[in-house]
Amino acid sequence: MRLPPWMWRVIRSRKTKIFLACAPFAFCLLVLLFYFGTSWWGRSRVERQLRDFESAGYVVDPEKYWLPSIPAQDDLFQDPLFQEEQRDRVLLPLNPGHTKIPNLAKRLPKAEPSLARMTELSRWLNPPMPDDRTAAELLLKEHHAAVERLEVLRPVFARSKQAVWPVEMAGNDFGGGPELASVAGPMIRLRHSAQAAGEIAVLHFAAGDADKSAAAVAAMLDIVRLEMEPKPALVSVILADVLLRNIQAVIWEGVVRGSWSDAHLQAFDKSLASFRPQQAGLKSHLGEIALLRSQTKWLLASRRALPEIEIDWPAGSRKWEPSAIWDATKEAAGQLRSPGLELAGGVKSQREFLDAVPRAGGAPRERFTAQNLDEFRRIDETSGRTSLEFTGGAQALVILASSTLRMETTIALTRTGIALERYRVGKGNGTYPDSLAALVPDFLPEVPMDPLGTQPLHYQLQADGSPHLWSVGGNFTDDGGKPHFDFTEGDLIWITRPLPGFTTEKDLRR
């Protein structure tokens, strides 16, 4: 097809050549205008959200939200003894990376409630010790400073009413700004203290001192209480969930070893009965709102005006192929994502998260249920993912609801397991009851319901007379008391003897 003469004149004209020469620059200018325009738009959305929350009465400044509102003597982090532990950290888990204990083979294996196996302390050292008592005595001797520090801190944990998270730390190890790092940092240190207390408890009851072991468990329980009681954030709820499972493991390990007296078990039960994971979960959104200004400021400050484009252009400019240039250009364009669009997406997901936590169906939410968790999972599966440092969206709701419900289930299983053991050492004359109804009212006020189901906790006696107690777990399906490493795959259980086919952690992952 031949072009008409007038079209050839237009193509060959000077104006056309100038236009074609300027087109790439015009295109770049349009891209930059879009980039900076969306950045301004995203920042304005963030500012509007902050103003909306402030006008609704929420505190969006961490310094104001976490200001100490209790006497200094009631605040764990203001106690001189605990401050000494923060400066000179002695109470650390027995870990080759943290301690100087010779011959420590590996990180100490935690008692595994899902497998109900006895911890073999003799294998904690290389070469292995002849028996558990010898290994425990050696490790207690090597860990003497930490054991003494725990004894000093134990009454501090018990008398402290709160742990008011400080927000003045300058460092930033967490995405979301220095304020989030300063709030989350002490939580992590408390978790290490609880882990160390748990390991000391295992060493004490392996060495034959049940009273000292029970005191270490009491310290663990106090740490979880301090984790849950103050103004929490999502981080504290997640860590409290982990700590409660560690406590369940240590209490279970003592049951297997026959270390606890009825007085010890009563004290554990009283402490567990005071925990309110649902309230902590429902309050966590207030902590997230208090970190909003910090998170948004950090996200804006961490974005360059223009990002650095990292791309390997084809080598040898004279040998460039059009297809290679086009692929490289697409890759560069993919890296030029506007922070404004990311901010806008973050505002949307954060707003959805914060709106969904305190309210459900227009009415104030009183607790998370298995139906809520199932709903959040479905929303999460259909929602888009963002590469944001914000804590928001359906995925955060899934984490929050699952942590809260798992905490509640862990408490129900542990309290029922304690009641079963108290029955055995008391009126059971060494045997466990045929049903949970036998525990009411002497050891439990009522038959405990399964927080993840619609029925009471499941219970049966194994062939050897040991109890097998379980919740339907995160899949909301009764799998007959078979555990799984994944919360969404199997049941959550309490047993005192190994289940057939479940003798190692690898068995849990099948």
Image (cartoon, helix red, strand yellow):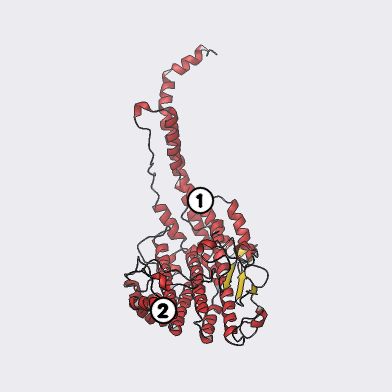
SS category of the residue bearing label 1? loop
**Percent position of residue 500, x then y:** 58, 67
SS category of the residue bearing label 2? helix
Q: Is residue 390 above or below residue 419?
A: above
**Percent position of residue 409, x then y:** 58, 71
Quadrant location of the C terminus? bottom right
Q: Which circle's residue, 2 or 1, is located before the other in the chain? A: 2
Quadrant location of the N terminus? top right
Residue at image coords 64%, 74%? 459
The disc at residue 133 is 2
Q: Quadrant of residue 418?
A: bottom right
Specify the amino acid type for callout 2.
Arg
Look at the image and tell me whether residue 161 can be seen.
no
Using residue 155 as the reference point, say whether residue 258 is left or right of it.
right
> What is the distance, in whole Å, between disc 2 and disc 1 at their CAs?
52 Å
**Percent position of residue 202, x then y:** 44, 76
Specify the amino acid type for callout 1.
Thr
Residue where numbered disc 1 is placed: 386
The disc at residue 220 is none
Look at the image and tell me whether residue 55 can be seen.
yes
- As rendered, which of 426 and 33 lies closer to the eye? 426
Using residue 158 as the reference point, say whether residue 470 is left or right of it.
right
- As rendered, which of 200 and 149 lies closer to the eye? 200
Q: Is residue 508 above or below residue 21?
A: below
- As rendered, which of 246 and 222 lies closer to the eye? 246
